[in-house]
Image (tube, rainbow, N blue to C red):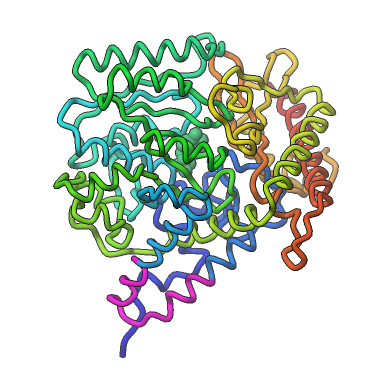
Amino acid sequence: MPSQPRWLLHPTAKQLTLGGDARLIVDPESGLNRYGCSPMPRDEAFSFASSTATSISRHGYEAACRLHDCLFQDETERIAEDRLHDVTSHLASTLTRTLQIDTRKPGVLLSASGTDSQMHATAIVACSERSPLVSVVCGSDETGSGTPYSVTGRHFDGVTAVGHIVEKGTRIQGFPEIQYLGVPFRDDRGRNKSPEELDQEVRQAVAHSVHRGYVVLLHLMDQSKLGCMAPSLNLVDELRQRFGDAVQVIVDACQLRLDMEDLATHLDRNHIVLITGSKFFTGPPFSGASLYPSSMVERWSRTNHRLPSGLSNYLDRCTLPDWLARATPPLPAPADIGMRLRWTAALEEMSRYFAIPRSERIRLLDDFGLRIKRILDEYPELQPIQSPHQRSAINNNGQGPELSSRPTLIPFRIAAPGHDTLPPEQAGALYQLLNQELTQHSMGRHMPHDLSSRACHIGQPVPLGNGLGAAMRISIGARIIAGCRDPETSIVDSGFLKVEEEKLRTVCSKIQFLARAITRSI
Ligand SMILES: Cc1ncc(COP(=O)(O)O)c(C=O)c1O
């Protein structure tokens, strides 16, 4: 009797935690992964964490269950694999259509996370180059923690996307040696460099590398963990003019807080673009994709380049798009459908967001942005952080009018008497406590019940270096905007923002309470 392949048998919530690195592993006690997210809807928690990751929504979960059920009807391993390949292609084409870049005909390689996609793009550039390579990473202090590894072809975690145990930091088989050069937004004293200084630093790093015979993978940040962008597109133009094909731009748009106009511009400029469905768009953790300009896809379809053999640790054979099929080493059979389910949930969030007309979305983003500002004003210890690199404040980069030109990541420091600002270690402890129900915890003893009983999830703190504490982050994610539309009537009503505003007030009150308790104890 035919039976379903084993890789379909895990229940949906379990599948959602498979097909990625150890960041997806759920602690059996808390039911949460390392980033404080649940693979089941966690409606009871107040979440403003899309800068890092968000628990799956009910809509997303239902969409994932539908796909899982549908695949379950395929009876034999071979038919199921064919279907999984089709499902993956379908997800990729739905993604480009949803983001309105399908007319550019980009190549799409879906992945388990933004960090996986950084590694995929590095592999694709690296294997078509004979010269030595260097990855120059702009905003290296505000990207993923695995980036120094992924952009140099090294294992960025102890577990790979297809579940192999590897040694973090070692070179993935088949990758050439790739140098790393980070260009952080802040200097050694924690001071923000000016945009001109940063451009000059990138200019020098690229020129110096090219003169020494390197091909440069220039990782352009658009946008960072704190909503920043660098280098400027003017500098990119200058570098391409001076050095031509010795510079390949890879855009870190993993936050996906930019508009389709800007995505299209990057592709038109022959930039590779990395995105995720799990940050602004609030799909479950994690999902990534690398997008390749059509000219590159055409070139690849005709060449005999071979991708690094170690990619077999990261991709199953149903993931590959046709244009890469000739170039790949033998890949394993699928072991789960986690990545497909997570992308399905992310696309559900995207479609709910884009169901609202653009003018309304802009109005709602502005409305909620103002509400956040007003709330932060009520809590003097929560001090917003400004940066000269914030994309929304840069006006020479042909910005789209929606996400590219307004802040949806709101970083702030916590003032702590005697310390200027809460040190990173204490900020980390606060972040953990904030996301827990504390009624039985010593920290919750003197807290009003509406705060101690409520888990509140915000972005992971980002250390600012040199005694400057850590940036805590509140973010506007797609779900807050999508929640304003009644799916039955299509009526958009900002009443939902009022509900979210009250939740945010609870989050800020709990942060203040915890910050005061923690400061008293240091
Ligand atoms: C700007 C940026 N790039 C890349 C990443 C890595 O993405 P992922 O967490 O999906 O691996 C992050 C993660 O926070 C990020 O903020």
Is 329 part of what is drawn in magenta?
no
Residue 428 horizontal/vertical position (percent): 60, 32
Q: How many marks?
A: 0
Q: Is residue 294 shown left or right of residue 309?
A: right
Q: Nearer the viewer, residue 207 or 417?
A: 207
Image quadrant in which you'd find residue 402: top right
Is 81 part of what is drawn in magenta?
yes
Residue 64 horizontal/vertical position (percent): 53, 66
Taking the view exactly as shown, the residue that stands out farthest to the front is 103
Residue appearing at x 52%, y 64% in the figure? 13
Q: Quadrant of the C terminus?
A: top right
What's the magenta bit mostly, secondary-structure-wise?
A: helix
Residue appearing at x 65%, y 39% in the figure? 458
Q: Quadrant of the N terminus?
A: bottom left
In the rendered view, would you say 165 is above or below 63?
A: above
Q: Is residue 363 shown left or right of residue 179?
A: right
Q: Which residues are magenta?
A: 66-85
Residue appearing at x 65%, y 57% in the figure? 355
Q: Is residue 171 shown left or right of residue 36?
A: left
Image quadrant in which you'd find residue 5: bottom left
In the rendered view, would you say 323 is above or below 294?
A: below
In the rendered view, would you say 89 is above or below 253?
A: below
Image quadrant in which you'd find residue 408: top right
Residue appearing at x 84%, y 51% in the figure? 495
Residue 503 horizontal/vertical position (percent): 79, 45
Q: Is residue 519 shown left or right of residue 287?
A: right
